[in-house]
């Protein structure tokens, strides 16, 4: 499989940079952003002492700059710099810790270098109306959410924005397109002196109301020398009048020193557009882990009573094309030995706890 040959990003970039350029034009720059904040009532049940708190949370607000320059002969240089904003506290703002890249768009596809969400993440994230909020499906799918990570800072998650990444996106042909990525090791050492690498790819098909996606990602040496982890995901979405239905299925497989640990998960969502508002419902199921007794990677553990389910119901109302109000309720039902938590704005739950959240918020995009 081409994902196992890490030299292709460098060869493709070199070939593209040698292409002749014609007349040049001044680059254009766009300032954009998203502000998304909510008041949440969160808590958990099933613990020795039930707990609850009311808090204001930031749902991944961003500020960014993007632009491109026409180089002639069908070539365009492009760039994007995007950073996070802590609307709730104003602390910890970063200039370029989110999707940031520089690259070339050619008649043969888009090639870029930088810090970006993997093709595996992007293949189905648009299927979830609550991505990225506290109620997002990455609480159960993908084994958590790993924002702003290199090859060793989070070795568990398959829902990740990756540093030091090269990506190639094919042109669209007859509705089909592909995205492929390789993350450079940068000389970093993982467990027991391993050299972790990431390879990710996704194929998609779009035809009118139908969208299909198939994605695979491999983490080489993440758990130790010669131990490779694999994620495979299949997704589908369909628009039918005022309805949008989506589904996804995923299998994660981790190679540990004790043996392979596997887990399957499933996701369903339905969105019903009612005038300027929409009613949104989602369901996610994480199966029990299969593997050697006592093995655990991230939220996934082997054995009985390690599964979980999440239900979310909410309503979104568009005040304009850029501003909206929303409310949702979400609950994670962990089995006795499961400790799944909200992937962002986590609560910090223990085994058998059942976290829940009720949120009301506002967002604005510009």
Image (cartoon, helix red, strand yellow):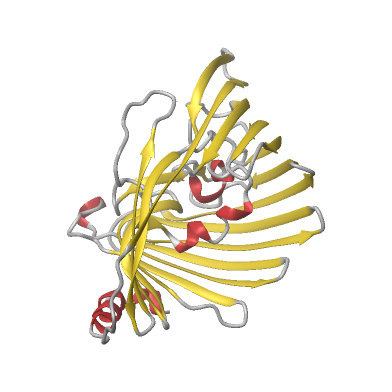
- Say if residue 350 shows up in the picture: yes
Q: 143 left or right of 105?
A: right
User: 236 above or below 145?
Assistant: below
Residue 278 location (% of width, % of height): 74, 42
Q: In the displayed image of the protein, which residue is found farthest to the top?
A: 49
Q: 110 left or right of 95?
A: right
Q: In the displayed image of the protein, which residue is found farthest to the left?
A: 187
Q: Residue at x 55, y 16 (%)?
A: 54
User: 362 above or below 130?
Assistant: above
Q: Residue at x 25, y 53 (%)?
A: 190
Give whichever of 253, 60 is nearer the camera: 60
The quadrant where residue 213 appears:
bottom right
Q: Residue at x 49, y 61 (%)?
A: 120
Give whichever of 252, 326 is nearer the camera: 326
- Say if residue 312 shows up in the picture: no
Residue 182 location (% of width, % of height): 34, 67
């Amino acid at each position: 499989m081409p994902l196992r040959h890490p030299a292709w990003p460098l060869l493709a970039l070199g070939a593209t940079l040698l292409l002749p350029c014609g007349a040049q034009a001044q680059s254009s720059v766009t300032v954009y952003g998203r502000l998304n904040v909510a008041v949440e009532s969160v808590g958990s049940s099933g613990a020795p002492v039930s707990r609850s708190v009311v808090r204001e949370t930031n749902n991944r607000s961003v500020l960014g700059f993007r632009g491109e320059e026409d180089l002639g002969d069908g070539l365009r240089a492009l760039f994007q710099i995007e950073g996070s904003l802590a609307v709730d506290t104003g602390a910890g703002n970063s200039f370029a810790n989110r999707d940031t890249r520089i690259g070339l768009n050619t008649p043969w596809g888009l090639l870029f270098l930088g810090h970006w969400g993997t093709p595996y993440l992007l293949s189905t994230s648009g299927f979830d109306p609550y991505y990225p909020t506290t109620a997002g499906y990455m609480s159960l799918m993908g084994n958590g959410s790993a924002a702003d990570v290199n090859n060793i800072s989070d070795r568990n998650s398959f829902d990740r924005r990756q540093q030091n990444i090269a990506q190639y996106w094919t042109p669209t042909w007859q509705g089909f397109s592909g995205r492929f990525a390789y993350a450079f090791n940068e000389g970093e050492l993982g467990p027991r002196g391993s050299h972790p690498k990431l390879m990710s790819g996704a194929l998609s098909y779009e035809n009118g109301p139908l969208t299909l996606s198939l994605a695979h990602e491999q983490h080489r040496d993440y758990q130790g020398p010669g131990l490779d982890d694999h994620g495979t995901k299949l997704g589908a979405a369909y628009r039918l009048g005022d309805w949008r239905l989506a589904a996804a299925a995923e299998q994660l497989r981790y190679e540990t020193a004790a043996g392979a640990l596997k887990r399957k998960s499933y996701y369903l969502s339905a969105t019903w557009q009612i005038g300027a508002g929409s009613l949104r419902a989602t369901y996610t199921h994480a199966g029990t882990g299969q593997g050697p007794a006592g093995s655990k990677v991230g939220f996934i553990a082997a054995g009985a009573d390690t599964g979980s389910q999440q239900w979310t119901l909410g309503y979104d109302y568009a005040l304009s094309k850029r501003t909206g109000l929303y409310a949702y309720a979400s609950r994670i039902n962990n089995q006795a030995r499961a400790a799944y938590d909200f992937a962002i704005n986590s609560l910090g739950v223990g085994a058998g706890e059942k976290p829940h959240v009720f949120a009301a918020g506002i967002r604005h995009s510009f």
